[in-house]
Image (cartoon, helix red, strand yellow):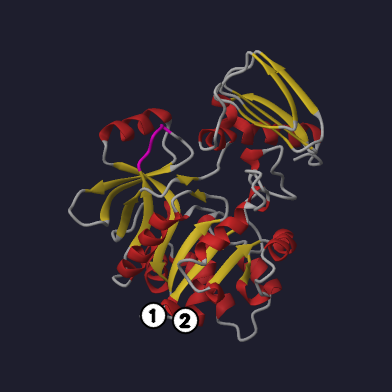
Amino acid sequence: MTQQNNYAVILASGTGVRLWPMSTVKKPKQFLDVLGIGKTLIQITYNRLKKVVPAENIFIITTEEYIHLVKEQIPTIIDSKIILEPRIMNTAACNLLAAMHIHQLNPLAKLIVAPSDHLIYDVHNFIDCINLAFDYADSDHLISIGVEPNRPDTNLSYVQIIENESPIKKVKTFVDKPDEDFAKTFIQSGDFFWNTGILIWSTKAILEAFESYRPSMIDTLKKYFEQPLRNPQVLKPIYTTLDVISINNAILEKAKNVYVIPSEIGWNDMGTWKSIHDHTPTDEDGNNIKCKYFVGYNTTNTFIHTTQEKAIIVNGLKDFVVIDSVNGLLICPKDNVKEIRSYVSNLRLSKGEKYC
């Protein structure tokens, strides 16, 4: 096989609620310059994937609400490379839609599926890992890129490996978003890795997995792909009947051919303000300040970010996140940022969607 059989799909339908108030439903985090470096997360992801697959083989799956943002931020992408997801139905549905779409174009396709909002600090190691994964994808492996966990994060999934001398390890157990006690146990055991959500497989292998473990989903989508003229309006009533389930729960926890490549790629899922603070440079007090007019006193280990032309004075904060945007103001202990999703849900219920 040549590199022409290697494809990439960027998942760009998410709403990024956990990075409120910068990230909102109208413009979620993948379309934001969260780090203040002049590039949005989806632009960084697209440029990274061009290093492992031909640019013409990169697809972006998103919803109708975000097509204009995709075209604005990736101006070289053409309409045929945008896969329209009629509605967010969790990751099993969008993975299946993308795999069936690309399999029809090339039955020999191998595919890297990548979230649009992750950072990779060691791109050289990333390239090596993906090339290795593409090699193993020829053997019908379902492959995850894994990283060693350094905290008991309950928002991530964990993979337990069967140790061997190979650079790719067979997965013994796949656990999606465990509670904190289990996560601590996993870290202490030393044989669990985080699943980064960066997945590599042949379209043939993942479609066979759906046939085995979620046959109703693939049978449903066949009704769309078997039509000679595929109209997105025809897809909507079909797609919205699919199971609302993650790819982890639907396939990866059940399949017997799941493998992980342990890596050191400097991965950050950019999932919370705390994780961003933990992976960005700080001053001598452990603070990361993105504010042109800031004065601070007795403030340590705090992340302060404003998109507004205003002054901020802070006194006596420790281990806090302060985010100020045109949509709202967040002041929250770092340890509580995992609750932002529920905070925003409560805001939406009580005050409406204007600022969410």
Q: How many marks?
A: 2
Q: Is residue 66 above or below residue 345?
A: below
Q: How far across and down, in percent of the image, does residue 355 sit? A: 79, 39
Give the Cα separation between the discs numbered 2 and 1: 12 Å
Residue under numbered circle 1: 2
What residue is shown at x 75% (from left), y 33% (from top)?
292
Q: Main secondary structure of the magenta part?
A: loop
Q: Which residues are magenta?
A: 148-152
Q: Is residue 311 left or right of residue 216?
A: right
Q: How far across and down, in percent of the image, does residue 1 sit? A: 35, 80
Q: Amino acid at mark 1?
A: Thr
Q: Amino acid at mark 2?
A: Asn
Q: Is residue 19 above or below residue 162?
A: above
Residue under numbered circle 2: 106
CB within 8 Å, label 2 to label 1? no
Q: Secondary structure at mark 2?
A: loop
Q: Is residue 228 above or below residue 16?
A: below
Is residue 12 visible in this depiction of the protein? no
